Amino acid sequence: MNRQRRLLLQALAATGLLGRLPQAQATCACSEAGRVVIIGGGFAGATCAKYLRYLNPQIEVILIEPKRDYYTCPFSNLVLAGMRTLPSLRQRYTALSKNYGIQVIHARVTAIEADVRLLQVNNEAWLPYDRLVVAPGISMLWNAPAGYDETAAEYMPHAWAAGPQTRLLRDQLQAMPDNGVVAISVPPRPFRCPPGPYERACLIGHYLKQHKPRAKLLMLDANETFSKQDVFEEAWSVLYPDMIERVGVSGYGGVTRVDARSNTLFTETDRYKVDVANVIPSQQAGQIAVQSGLADDSGWCPIDPSTFKSTLLPDIHVLGDACIADPIPKSATAANSQAKFAALVIAAELAEETPPLPSLHNTCYSIAAPDYAFSVTGMYALESGAIKANARAAAVSPLAAGNDLRKTEYRYAQGWYDSIIRDSFG
């Protein structure tokens, strides 16, 4: 431990702040193999914690996550369609603690002092680390569009963080008139889960088709193209003809302002008063990443692609939705893949061994209706100092595939979800 860090720890101990955490956590790393602290208990953080202990059970791993119950964004659109319940998406951290010896602290990290490898919890206790993993997911850029803030989200739910917002949007859909209009406002890229808004259109369409067949769904999109566009548009025409209408950015579909009290959305040229407004705002990295200096002017966190270490602060790995890892999309599978790679790097470095080169992947299933799904897959590696997609390993489900393939991919989607839940949280 360097002298600056030792003096700071002594000063904090004198104030009693270190003692406000359990003693094994508040002192310097008790394991000679090192202490790794992970901020964020989503797919990236939970997976990294598990695989660090799997690779080297002597590494002390502390996972800090404010929520005791984590609701997965994957499959949350199924709740809107009545195809899944919200409690079925709830994950807890008991298995990580019991099966892998991970110390789970339900608290909020409020500061990071990277130069001395300390972080502050709940504005009080300071916790030292040898390596830090920051996987905080996203935070919403309020007032993008104008007028959309935390209060507006209680009238126009974004449901882009699963849980109460998902329930609110579902309840609004159920309460709307039988001939009502639902609008989905899609922000400009980048955002979490690129195919997510378009899957949501399908599954809201499924609910409307079953319960309110005279209703309409309008997508106001700040993008011209989107992931799996051909396959989504085919699904809309086959499953929901004359129900779903999308207006892209060239048709002035980007929402610039909202009036939450009247459920009105404004674009550059038009005004839409609707019965249910699902406004997905622009996004950035989670707040702790932004406030601690891990994010650049884009609001996202640049990383060294060979290690996923921050290029802005030392010895901090940034994983999942928060990091800039183009062309890898912001998805659960990508976060899981990055987390495994980061665990390999950290375990190797703590053992003073050479870390491996990245080999990453993504798989994303989109469900359009019961027994109807499609997917996109990709493989990624380091090439000339940057992450590159392997063109020969990329695939999107074909058009005009027939019912058998769509049904098979629906079963694969269910299996994917069960598998990644076990891999990340089990």
Image (tube, grey):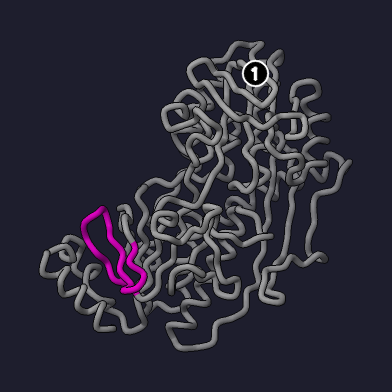
Residue 330 drawn at (x, y percent): 60, 53
Q: Is residue 204 above or below residue 355?
A: above
Q: Quadrant of the N terminus?
A: bottom left
Residue at 70% over, 19% down? 216
Residue at mark 1: 271
Q: Is 130 placed left or right of 316 in the picture? A: left
Q: Nearer the viewer, residue 256 or 66?
A: 256
Residue at 55% over, 24% down? 258
Label 1 Cα neighbours within 10 Å, binned few <14 / some 14-19 / many ≥20 = few
Q: Is residue 415 visible?
A: yes
Q: Is residue 40 above or below residue 31?
A: above
The amino acid beneath tag 1 is Arg
Helix, strand or loop at label 1? It is strand
Residue at 57% over, 20% down? 276
The stretch drawn in magenta includes residue 125: yes
Residue 62 drawn at (x, y percent): 34, 66
Residue 274 drawn at (x, y percent): 61, 17
Q: Nearer the viewer, residue 89 or 344?
A: 344
Q: Is residue 139 above or below residue 159?
A: below
Q: Spot the residue most to the right.
A: 400
Residue at 49% over, 58% down? 295
Q: Is 15 placed left or right of 366 in the picture? A: left
Total numbered labels placed on residues in the image = 1
The stretch drawn in magenta includes residue 128: yes
Residue 33 drawn at (x, y percent): 36, 82
Magenta region, residue range: 112-129
Q: Quadrant of residue 59?
A: bottom left
Q: Nearer the viewer, residue 290 or 63?
A: 290
Q: Is residue 79 visible?
A: no
Q: Is 238 placed left or right of 213 in the picture? A: right
Q: Is residue 383 above or below residue 170?
A: below
